[in-house]
Structures are given as structure tokens and as C-alpha cells.
Amino acid sequence: DSGVTQTPKHLITATGQRVTLRCSPRSGDLSVYWYQQSLDQGLQFLIQYYNGEERAKGNILERFSAQQFPDLHSELNLSSLELGDSALYFCASSESGTAVKNIQYFGAGTRLSVL
Amino acid sequence: AQSVTQPDIHITVSEGASLELRCNYSYGATPYLFWYVQSPGQGLQLLLKYFSGDTLVQGIKGFEAEFKRSQSSFNLRKPSVHWSDAAEYFCAVLPIMEYGNKLVFGAGTILRVKS
């Protein structure tokens, strides 16, 4: 168990809908990361938050947004869902907000199916 | 841009045989390097990491990896594979960026173990 908790484990929804994925980082970790794993794109970095502030952005669609709350949990919001958004979404956390000795621990993921 | 290449999509080895999974990276400097393993339906588990120093690093579950700067490689090895090692293995690099800490993953290698 990595200590990173993601809910829900599975999510099935329809095109055009909006969903929220939740992540609780390991105790003491200030950084949260979101990654998307799909068959065609592999594992792709979406976004990083550090202590409530956005730190880095990857290839995240404008329909997607995230935030990190004062208790350090994070939510990834996906809206106007399309079939191609079906994927496994991972959250990771790390103690550090810099690259130095940055070790990211991953949750079990949320599998999103858009029908 | 940084990239990670795992040349082997699938590898099949016999139980008890040795294993080597290849990983090459493209980056202007020496990045931080990682191997993660993903079992079916599971999240990503960190096997080992390289930051600096000794180029042979030991990880969990009897795995080790060797960093070779001249070849831009970070190959994963195990002397004797167990059936429970069947999983997908990902090599990842963490470019040492000024701001933000995104992992860049390879496409993964699926390991099958035959008895």
C-alpha cells in the first residue's frame, strides 16, 4: 500500500457528462500529481500541485481542471466527457515540490469508462 | 524533449531464468531514473530509483538496475524470475527542471513468466 488513496476505483458515465476524481496524498506529502494512462498514449503527466498551488502542467485538456485543497487532498474534474477520455487516471504524491530526490508514490488509480 | 524508450513490448521468460528489461532515455543531462511495476488491476509500485552515486542500484523484490551514462541506459535485471513477477514494467525519468516535476514514462514492457 503506497499510502495514496484514490476514489472511486471505477467510474462509468456517458458522453457529455462531468465527473470528479479524488486523491488523498500520503501523510506529509505536499505535492500531488495526476497522470492519465490510456492504450494509445501510455502514461502521460497531466498536472502537479504543490501545497495548494499549481506547479506544472502537462498535456491537460481545457475540459479538465484540478485543484488541491488546504487539507492537501486533490480533485481532478473532467467535463464534457468524450469516448476518448476513457482511461486509468493515477494520482501520485511526493514530499518534495522540487526535483531533488523527488520520489512519487502512486495510488491504485480510477478507471473511467465513458460510454 | 525528454523521451524514454523501452524497446521490448513483450518479454517471456521461464520461471527461474534471469531477466533484463531495457530502457534508454534521451535527455540533455543525467535525469533521475526510476522503474515502476504495474500488476493487473493495480497501481504503479516503485521498484527502484537512481539519483546519483553508485550506478548499480538495488530495489525491492530482488530487482536491480544499472545506470550507464555512456549508453543513456538504465536496464532492470533480476537473476531468477518468479511467477509472481509477471506484470508490466515501466521505466521513467524525472528531468531536473527548474519548476515542476513530471515523470516521463516509457511505453512499458509486459513480462510473461512461463512455468
Image (tube, coloured by chain):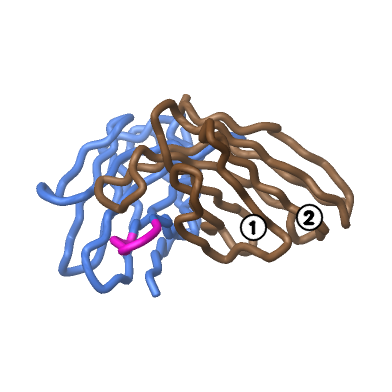
Chain colours: A brown, B blue
Q: Which residues are magenta?
A: B95-100
Left or right of B30, for residue A51 = right
- Horizontally, residue B2 falls left or right of residue A7, namely left
Write down the chain letter for disc 1: A
Residue A75: x %, y % from top left: 64, 42
Closer to the camera in the image, B19 or B30: B30
Q: Mark 1: which secondary structure?
A: loop
Res. B113 in view: no
Q: Tell me where residue B41 appears, x and y as whole percent.
A: 61, 35
Image quadrant holding the N terminus of chain B, namely bottom left
Q: Which mark is residue A3?
A: none
* Residue beneath the point at 55% across and 31% down: A24
Say which amino acid is labelled 1.
Answer: Leu
Mark 2 crowd level (few <14, some 14–19, many ≥20, 10 Å Cα): some
- A63 shown above or below A72: below
- Is any part of residue B6 visible from this angle? yes
Q: Amino acid at mark 2?
A: Ser
Quarter-of-image position of residue B62: top left
Residue at horizontal 25 percent and vertical 38 percent from the top: B79
Labels 2 and 1: the sequence-earlier one:
1
Residue A79 marker? 2
Q: Is residue B98 magenta?
A: yes
Q: Is residue B17 above or below residue B67?
A: above
Give the labeled residue for mark 1.
A39
Residue at the extreme front: A70
Mark 2 residue element = loop
